[in-house]
Amino acid sequence: MRWGTYFAVLASVLSVGLALGVSMPLVSLRLEGWGYGGFAIGVMAAMPALGVLLGASLASRLAGWVGVPAAMRLCLWGGALSIGLVALLPSYPLWLALRLLIGMSLTVVFILGESWINQLVVEQWRGRLVALYGSSYALSQLAGPLVLGVLGSDDDFGFWAATGLLLLAPVLLLGRGGAPSTDACSVTFSDLFGFCRRLPVIAWAVALFAAFEAMILTLLPVYCLQQGFTTEIALFMVSTVVVGDAVLQLPIGALADRISRQALFTGCAVALLVSSLAIPMLLQTPLIWPLWVVFGASAGGLFTLSLILIGERYRDDALVRANAHVAQLWGIGCLLGPLLAGAGSQWVSGHALLWLMAAGAAGLVLLTRRPGAFEPAAA
C-alpha cells in the first residue's frame, strides 16, 4: 500500500474541510449581522449544494481528460479563487454565484479524493483507514470554527486563511500515483436513480448526513444565538458536534473491521434519532455537551460506514462513479436540508433543524429493518 500517497490525499482533503469550516460559519454570521432571516441564510447555505450536483456530473469527465491528481489540483485552486472573491465582493447576490462555484470545484476534490483513498486501502484495514479519512475531515472542520473564533468574525481574515489553505494543498499531490483510472463520461441523474435502487439505505444515509453537515455549519450557529447563547458559545457548540464526529469515527471504523457493519450502521441511525429529539429538552442543561458529541458521532458514523460499504463493492471507474453518486446525494441533502430547516425555523419553530434530523433518522431506521436492506438489489 502507498502510505505516502494515502496521507497526501488525506491532507489535501483535510485542507478543504478546514477552509470550509472557517468560511461557512463566517458567511452565515455575516449575513445574520446584515439582518437577513433564517430563510435567506438557508438559501445561501444551499447554493453549494447546487454546485455539488453540477460538480458530480463533471468529476468523471474531468478526471478522464487530465487524470485524477491533475483534476484535484485544478479544482483546489478554483475553490481558493472563489473564496477569495467572497472576501473581495461583499454582496448577497454575488455570494450566491460564488458559493455555487465553490460547491462545484470542491465536489470534484471530494469525489476523486474518496475514490483515491478507497482504491488504495487494503480490505483488512478498510474500516480503520476510511474512518481515519472521515475523522481527519471532521477534525479539520472542528478546527475551522475554532480558528474563526481566534481570528474573529468582524473582518475577512477567515476568508483569506481559507483561500491560502486551498492554494497550498495541490502541492501535496505532485508526483503521487495509485489513483483510480476512469473514463471521460458524465454521471447522470438516471444513473443516480439506479444506484439508489440498488443501495437505498446507503443513499438515504448519505443524503441525511449531507443535510446534517450543511445545517450544522451554517444554521446551528444561528440556532444557538437565537436560543440566547453568545457568539463564542455558539461556535463552541458547533465545534463540540464536530468533536463527536471526529473523535468517535476511529473506534467506529475499528469496530467495522471486527463486527457486523450492518448492525453498527443501524445503531448509529438509532443514536442520531434519540439525540435529535433530546437536544431541545436538554439545551439549557450541562447534559447538552455530551449530547452534542453523540449527535455528531452518530451522524458521522453513518457516512463513514456508507463509504466503507461502497469501497467493498467497487473499483476504478465504477468506484469513481459510485462516489459521484454519493456527491449527487450530498448535493440533494445539502440543498433540501438548509432550505427546509431555514424555512421551518423562521415560520414554524426554532427547533425545526433538530426535528428535521429526527425525521430523517427515523426514516433511515425503518429502511434498515427491511429484509436484505444492505444487499445490493438488481439494477
Image (tube, rainbow, N blue to C red):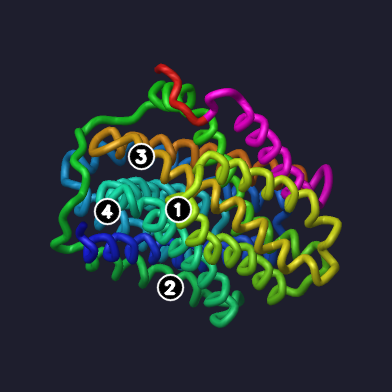
Depth-wise, is mark 3 or mark 4 nearer the camera? Answer: 3
Q: Residue at x 28, y 51 (%)?
A: 122
Residue linked to disc 1? 98
Residue linked to disc 2? 160
Upstream in the sequence, badge 2 or badge 1?
A: 1
Q: Residue type at mark 2?
A: Trp
Upstream in the sequence, badge 3 or badge 2?
A: 2
Q: Marks 4 and 2, how far apart in space?
A: 21 Å
Depth-wise, is mark 4 or mark 2 nearer the camera? Answer: 4
Residue 114 on the magenta segment: no
Upstream in the sequence, badge 3 or badge 4?
A: 4
Q: Marks 2 and 1, how far apart in space?
A: 15 Å
Using the image as rendered, state which of residue 185 and residue 99 is in the foreground. 185
Q: Marks 3 and 2, how far apart in space?
A: 39 Å
Q: Please tell me whether mark 3 sits on a helix, a strand or a loop.
A: helix
Using the image as rendered, state which of residue 55 and residue 279 is in the foreground. 279
Upstream in the sequence, badge 4 or badge 2?
A: 4
- On the rendered image, what quadrant is the C terminus found in? top left
Badge 3 crowding class, 10 Å Cα cut-off, few under 14, some 14 to 19, many 20 or more, is: few
Q: Marks 3 and 4, how far apart in space?
A: 23 Å
Give yes or no for contact between labels 4 and 2 (Cβ–Cβ under 8 Å): no
- x, y (%) of residue 300? 55, 53
Q: Is residue 228 above or below residue 65?
A: below
Magenta part of the chain: 346-373
Q: Is residue 88 above or below residue 364?
A: below
- x, y (%) of residue 298? 61, 52
